[in-house]
Amino acid sequence: MYIAICDDDIRIAAHMKEKLLETVNSQIARADIFTSPHELMFSMEEQRFDIVFMDIELGEVSGIDLAKRILTHYPDTQIIFVSGHDDYYLDVYDVEHIYFLKKPINADKLKCAFTTACRKLQDRKNDFLSFSNKQGLFRIALKDILFLEKKQRLIHIHTQDGQVHKMYGKFPDLVPQLNPFFIQCHVSYIVNLRNVTAMEKQDFHLSNGRTIPISKNHYKEIKETFLAYLERKY
């Protein structure tokens, strides 16, 4: 696991890293400390972190807002919020996270938060789309799929690495293999909501800059599904 600890108090961050290494050292490949939100975002462009321990108060920057930015670009990152105040307990539910730790950090709760994050990461790794074509058998992680495009008898599977995989089939037969993060927004498109950065009246905007059309006839239903996703209702 690659871990990031973001806290503007270097002493607290170092103490948390020490506790982590004492408790779950065998599962950690790397643990980096960041006292600046900007340093963390810059580092994540080259190094993906599986788990981020995020202090909520980071000077002029809110840890909650920073977490939202991280999840927009790296939706699989597991966020564990850390704070010395209970005042933020409800605020953190504005963003997807898996634990809220109260300072001073309790070793047992720290281990529990880490274990929960690891389990969630493993669950996501088990989500795959399996299919075959003339080239052979393939298995693609659902999290890596940006959108699916129907072109005549073929379904084009567009992934985050820029590749396009092709398979024969129909959307109704494919949908049962997907998870609730996927929604058919047009007769020719299914999008992965985890890679959507914005929704407008006619389009979804994806994290790779691509825009996907939204059916006018089903706009209201699609909007409600997208809002439910944002509110983490499922």
Image (cartoon, helix red, strand yellow):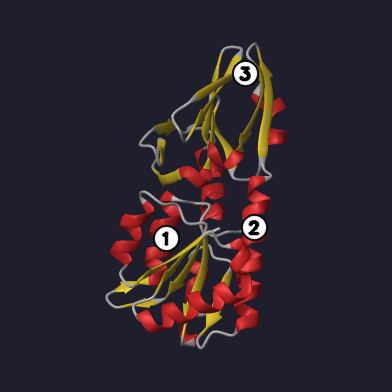
| Closer to the camera in the image, 197 or 70 | 70
Earlier in the chain: of badge 3 and badge 1, it is 1
* Secondary structure type for disc 1: helix
How many other residues sit within 10 Å of disc 1, few (<14), some (14-19) or many (≥20)? some
Callout count = 3
Quadrant of image for the N terminus: bottom right
Query: Label 3 vs label 2: CA separation?
Result: 29 Å
- Residue at (34% x, 58% y) in the render: 41
Residue 120 horizontal/vertical position (percent): 64, 58
Q: Are marks 2 and 1 in contact (CB under 8 Å)?
A: no
Inspect this view and state whether residue 128 appears: yes
Residue 199 horizontal/vertical position (percent): 41, 44
* Secondary structure type for disc 2: helix
Query: Label 2 vs label 1: CA separation?
Result: 18 Å
Residue 89 horizontal/vertical position (percent): 52, 80
Residue 233 against residue 83 in the figure, above or below: above
| Closer to the camera in the image, 223 or 138 | 138
Q: Are marks 3 and 2 in contact (CB under 8 Å)?
A: no
Residue 233 horizontal/vertical position (percent): 61, 58
- Residue at (55% x, 79% y) in the render: 19
Q: Amino acid at mark 3?
A: Met
* Secondary structure type for disc 3: strand
Earlier in the chain: of badge 3 and badge 2, it is 2
Instruction: Name the residue beneath numbered marker 1.
Output: 68
Instruction: Name the residue beneath numbered marker 3.
Output: 167
How many other residues sit within 10 Å of disc 3, few (<14), some (14-19) or many (≥20)? some
Q: Amino acid at mark 2?
A: Lys
Instruction: Name the residue beneath numbered marker 2.
Output: 120
Q: Amino acid at mark 1?
A: Lys
